[in-house]
Image: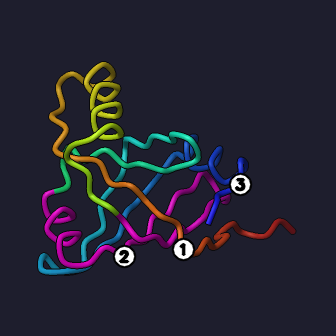
Amino acid sequence: MKLSESILHVLLSAQAKALATTGPAGLNVVPVSTVRIIEDEVYLVDCFFNKTRQNLQAENEVALTFWSGLIGYQLKAETEYLSFGGAFEKISKWAQQHYPERKVHGVIKLKPVEIFDISVPRL
């Protein structure tokens, strides 16, 4: 499933982003601060996702919700956790340039399955 340019724009500019996982670490929802789009593919940078990483080893389905004000979306996706390879190297290098105080543990590649508009209708 390819995400539209308008959805990608909302994702990159969203004031708030939250990733939900489930698995051995239990139900877990974490704030997301670092998102990259490369060739229409969505990647999340793992610098602080300890419980998320544990959950992704057992269950690769996630929900990413992102919004600004009353405009937002929920993206349900399957994931691939990357700790080596071209995309990992490219995104890690970018993250280290922008956030040198953070250690990149991995990169989560999202494969969108469903998208829901959670925007509040305008009256």
Q: Position of residue 67 (x, y in %)?
A: 57, 56
Q: Residues within 10 Å of mark 3 (few under 14, many from 20)?
A: few
Q: Is residue 115 left or right of residue 107?
A: right
Residue 53 to residue 82: above or below:
below
**Quick check: 51 above or below 84?**
below
Q: Nearer the viewer, residue 75 or 1?
A: 1
- Reply above or below: 115 against 53: below
Quadrant for the C terminus in the image: bottom right
- Residue at (31, 29) in percent of width and height: 95
Residue range in magenta is 50-79
Mark 2 vs mark 3: which is more N-terminal? 3
Say which residue label 2 marks. 61
Residue 6 in the image, given as x and y percentages of width and height? 72, 49
Q: Label 1, on which residue?
A: 113
Q: Which residue is mark 3?
A: 4
Q: Amino acid at mark 3?
A: Ser
